[in-house]
């Protein structure tokens, strides 16, 4: 125990396909403190969604390896059996908003009835009581409570996404995992959702894991940033230092490819493509794209702890 | 063909779009009333040879329809499209073959835009065959040349591959290769990078920029992403509810946005900055209007915080030239300025 709300230690999740074993989450460790938000950023296919699914235990059917430690309030979630996990954790203490969730509402059931399902299922509330709770929650979030009597098609995408987020708050969870909660939404709608999430973060002190491919957007919520590359966290850093001075060569190059609206900067891209998770190279996984690589990089780099909750997985920082 | 270009002075723009309109007729409900979706409603744009502009707007604002209408994949309802001095607004499909050669389209989803059963060679050969290049050797040369231009090199490694064997970025480069193989003068790139990762985005946009500069291509970059326009276009047109509500040189417009909608957009788009998380940003209420039934007066008026009641909600605002190369369609600036429409 180190006081962290969620402590992930050497988490691995591999799954088997016809073409071989995909190492989607490969030795990932990080700490999340109560009320904090960790943004997980990285390119598509880097394993960030798999990391979320491993924490909430929504594993692919062909999972071959699932091990490590997920300490949540000191309790190792990996040790729980499925029934216990469903009863005590998933959608009770930890909620999860999957990607494109706004399209996952049932079109023929009214919003209200869909929203209260977790309350009836997990907390055994009766329907009226649950509806009352849902109405109150919408009110506090500044969402019109009349939506309860509407069908999903009557709402815009942004509204549906707000409903989904409200739904994930209904059971008073301690941790919310949001997987690309604003992708596919328009700029202004996105800003609205982000405002809602900031409000939740400030007022309800919920811990969040915010998964996104958008570096600029991640800074809207992140207290800490985890940069993922090829199934691993290559840098874990505080927001204050990360956005001004990313340390891992991949983070640096990624930051160089982010256009800024308010000032000019030199934009650059990373040549090449990330390695396939089916066939990972030996040593540092960023080796062949890295401008700073040297001989040592052919050996697997250790995760070096530079400060409290500040780790970089790179040989450049371990020479002394 | 050559006769077409005669009598055109060098100074005239490559493309002139004047008060362009595209309405789609629809019926609502069973035996419903006839109505029109006004997807493009009075757009005026002018584009010089070798220039790159961007059209920025949210989904459903009509930017894709505008692009497709400019390419004459749709026939305009009203207005004019003049390309190289020749009006093609209502030209028949069969008389537009030359225009197809002069223009190219790059769409959002590269994989969807590529036939999965054709090799790269076949994909790139098809337009050459259609446009009458009979010599096989020449076709082969032009295919190699196009692949080199988009840096799918070494060419031999790629030419026999199928689209699914390429990464997303490579697929989009192939789409670009196809769009430039007939050496067009104008490329319309409709959200060419929105499905790609950050680094690949910049790679593709830089490629388009290189092509534009090297071969005097004109590019219309259609996007919802204002932050990339700063780097990849010389002029920005902001579109809202089927109309251009502000336009100007990129730097000027971004430094000095005037329309309340543009200001709202610029206000909410984040740059990577850890202090963002402490600020709740002001966002205009509501949603963009239904294009079948847009509000009276200014189309942004129901959401606008600077609303002048009695004017903005009644009368359509004029487009006003606020400074050289900066125009805004808003009543706030209508006092002593020169009206241009």
Image (cartoon, helix red, strand yellow):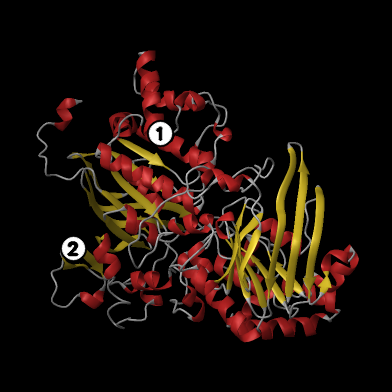
Q: Image point 37% across, 81% down: which residue? A: B305
Tell whether A7 sits left or right of B137.
right
User: Percent position (x, y) of residue A207?
Assistant: 67, 76
SS type, badge 2: loop
Residue at (51% x, 77% y) in the render: B277
- Residue B334 as seen in the image, left or right of residue B309: left
Disc 1 crowd, CA 10 A, few/some/many (<14, 14-19, 20+): many
The residue at which mark 1 appears reads as: B177
Cα distance in 3D space between marks 2 and 1? 39 Å
Question: What chain does badge 1 belong to?
Answer: B
Chain letter for the residue marked with disc 2 in the picture? B
Q: Residues within 10 Å of mark 2 (few under 14, many from 20)?
A: few
| Residue A247 appears left or right of B216 | right
The quarter of the picture where the C terminus of chain B appears is bottom left
Q: What x and y, as percent, mark residue A199?
A: 57, 82
Q: Which residue is mark 2?
A: B341
Please, is residue A88 above or below residue A68 in the view? below
């Amino acid at each position: 125990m180190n006081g962290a709300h969620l402590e992930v230690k050497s988490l691995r999740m591999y799954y088997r396909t016809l073409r071989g074993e995909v190492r989607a989450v490969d030795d990932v460790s990080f700490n999340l403190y109560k009320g904090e938000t960790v943004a997980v950023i990285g390119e598509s296919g880097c394993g960030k969604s798999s990391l979320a699914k491993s924490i909430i235990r929504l594993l692919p059917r062909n999972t071959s390896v699932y091990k490590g430690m997920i300490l949540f309030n000191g309790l190792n979630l990996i040790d729980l059996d499925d029934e216990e996990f469903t009863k005590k954790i998933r959608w009770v203490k930890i909620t999860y908003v999957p990607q494109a969730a706004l399209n996952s509402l049932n079109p023929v059931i009214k919003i209200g009835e869909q929203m209260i399902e977790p309350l009836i299922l997990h907390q055994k509330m009766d329907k009226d009581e649950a509806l009352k709770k849902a109405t109150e929650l919408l009110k506090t979030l500044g969402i019109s409570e009349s939506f309860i009597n509407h069908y999903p098609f009557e709402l815009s995408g942004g509204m549906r996404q707000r409903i989904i987020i409200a739904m994930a708050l209904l059971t008073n969870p301690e941790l919310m995992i949001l997987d690309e909660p604003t992708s596919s939404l328009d700029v202004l709608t996105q800003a609205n959702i982000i405002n809602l999430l900031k409000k939740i973060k400030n007022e309800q002190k919920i811990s969040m894991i915010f998964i996104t491919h958008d570096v600029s957007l991640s800074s809207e919520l992140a207290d800490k940033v985890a940069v993922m590359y090829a199934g691993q966290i290559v840098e874990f850093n505080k927001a204050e230092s990360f956005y001004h001075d990313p340390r891992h060569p991949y983070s640096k190059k990624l930051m160089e490819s982010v256009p800024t609206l308010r000032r000019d900067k030199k934009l650059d891209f990373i040549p090449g493509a990330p390695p396939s998770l089916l066939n990972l190279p030996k040593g540092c996984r960023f080796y062949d794209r890295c401008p700073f690589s040297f001989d040592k990089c052919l050996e697997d780099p250790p995760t070096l702890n530079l400060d409290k909750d500040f780790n970089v997985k790179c040989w450049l920082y371990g020479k002394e | 063909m050559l006769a077409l270009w005669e009598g055109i002075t060098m100074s005239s723009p490559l493309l002139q779009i004047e008060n362009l309109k595209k309405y789609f007729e629809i019926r609502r409900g069973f035996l419903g009333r006839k109505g029109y979706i006004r997807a493009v409603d009075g757009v005026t744009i002018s584009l010089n040879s070798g220039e790159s502009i961007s059209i920025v707007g949210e989904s459903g604002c009509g930017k894709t329809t505008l692009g497709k209408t400019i390419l004459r994949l749709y026939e305009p309802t009203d207005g004019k499209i003049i390309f190289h001095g020749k009006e093609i607004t209502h030209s028949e499909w069969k008389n537009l073959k030359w225009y197809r050669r002069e223009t190219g389209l790059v769409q959002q989803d590269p994989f969807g835009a590529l036939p999965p059963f054709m090799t790269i060679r076949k994909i790139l050969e098809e337009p050459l065959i259609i446009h009458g290049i009979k010599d096989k050797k020449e076709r082969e040369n032009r295919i190699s040349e196009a692949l080199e231009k988009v840096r799918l090199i070494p060419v031999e490694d790629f030419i026999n591959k199928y689209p699914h064997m390429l990464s997303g970025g490579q697929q989009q480069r192939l789409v670009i290769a196809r769009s430039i193989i007939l050496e067009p003068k104008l490329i319309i790139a409709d959200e060419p990078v929105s499905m790609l990762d950050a680094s690949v985005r910049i790679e593709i946009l830089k490629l388009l920029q290189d092509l534009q500069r090297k071969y005097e291509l004109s590019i219309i970059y259609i996007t919802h992403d204002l932050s990339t326009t700063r780097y990849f276009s010389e002029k920005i047109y902001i579109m809202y509810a089927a109309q251009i509500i502000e336009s100007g040189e990129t730097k000027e417009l971004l430094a000095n946005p005037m329309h309340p909608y543009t200001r709202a957009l610029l206000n909410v788009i984040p740059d990577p900055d850890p202090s963002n998380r402490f600020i709740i940003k002001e966002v205009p209420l509501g949603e963009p209007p239904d294009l079948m039934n847009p509000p009276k007066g200014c189309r942004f008026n129901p959401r606008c915080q600077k609303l002048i009641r009695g004017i903005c909600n009644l009368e359509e605002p004029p487009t006003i030239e606020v400074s050289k190369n900066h125009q805004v369609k808003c009543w706030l600036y209508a006092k002593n300025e020169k009206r241009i429409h």
